[in-house]
Amino acid sequence: FLREPPAKFLWSGFDPHAYLAKVAADDDSWEELPEPSGSQEMVLLVGPPASGKSRLAKTKLKGYTWVNRDTYKTQAKCQKVAEEALNKGKSVVIDNTSPAAKTRAEYIAIAKKHKVPVRCWEQIIDRALAKHLNF
């Protein structure tokens, strides 16, 4: 093109094959994930985008009211949905990145108002992997 010589292309950045080679085949970390408690509660998921929060919410916490900012668009709407679910006696899982303590405190206050325990689960993931999964 335009008489330019072909450019060499080199893969760079995150290598998923190398990452998977490092991960133990018998990794049992999935077993450590929170299970439903059996009584009404709020589970607050924290972690970067593409860290597995939604997968956890949908597979391990089935039956919980799923509150996700991607779905409800605003923090106020998410809090309203959480509050309504707690009013109905349902458990709630907050599936947002929730990086700020202030944001988490607002959900904790809602749970306290309803005298419902809160569990916080932080999804710890290699940033390069999260970036790879999110793009």
Image: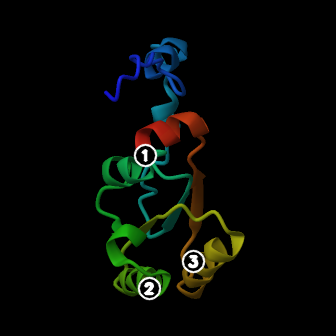
Mark identifier at residue 134 = 1
Provide the residue designation for mark 2: 83
**Residue 91, quarter of the rendered image:** bottom left
Lower sequence index among marks 1 and 3: 3
Q: Nearer the viewer, residue 18 or 10?
A: 10
Provide the residue designation for mark 3: 107
Q: Would residue 67 be visible to someone looking at this image?
A: no
Residue at x-position 42% and y-position 71%? 69
Residue type, mark 1 in image: Asn
| 96 vs 109: above or below | above
Residue type, mark 3 in image: Tyr
**Residue 105, quarter of the rendered image:** bottom right
Foreground disc of the pair 1, 3: 1
Residue at x-position 45% and y-position 15%? 8
Residue at x-position 32% and y-position 71%? 71
Q: Rate crowding at label 1 as few (under 14), some (14 to 19) or many (20 or more) other CA atoms within 10 Å.
A: few
Q: CA distance from mark 1 to mark 3?
A: 26 Å
| 62 vs 50: above or below | below
